[in-house]
Amino acid sequence: MSIYVGNLPYEVTEQELNEVFSDYGTVKRVTIPVDRETGKVRGFGFVEMETESDESPAIEALDGAEWMGRELRVNKARPRSENNNRNRGRGDRERF
């Protein structure tokens, strides 16, 4: 399971986010999506921890915490299929 991290500063790097979460356990992967057109960070990211038991302490400690001048929003990420289904309808309407 992944952790969603919202309200990230636009200048954040994957390495910096990795360092913050590594205080709570082993980080397997960090992903920070970028806008396709501008190439800029979109303001959110995902962190995958080595074990699920590392996730809860990280979420509890970092949700609402101020980091790099921003108040982080941290919670369990929703499964990818839920996000895709929600966005699929918008794309269909825009094409017509």
Image (spheres, grey):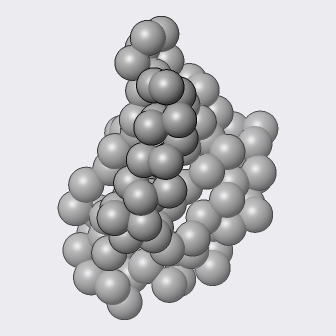
Question: Residue drawn at (45%, 25%), measured in percent from left and top?
Answer: 95
User: Which percent across, then down, holds residue 24?
Assistant: 44, 73
Question: Residue drawn at (39%, 18%), measured in percent from left and top?
Answer: 36
Can residue 22 be seen from the camera position used here? no
Eyeballing the image, is 45 above or below 73? above
Q: Residue furthest bottom?
A: 53
Number of on-image labels? 0
Q: Nearer the viewer, residue 77 or 10?
A: 77
Q: Nearer the viewer, residue 56 or 87?
A: 87
Asked if residue 50 lies left or right of residue 18, the reply is left
User: Which percent across, then down, holds residue 59?
Assistant: 56, 74
Q: Residue furthest top?
A: 38
Q: Nearer the viewer, residue 52 or 96?
A: 96
Can residue 11 be seen from the camera position used here? yes
User: Which percent across, then down, holds residue 96?
Assistant: 49, 25
User: Which percent across, then down, holds residue 46?
Assistant: 41, 54
Eyeballing the image, is 91 above or below 48? above
Q: Nearer the viewer, residue 23 or 76?
A: 76
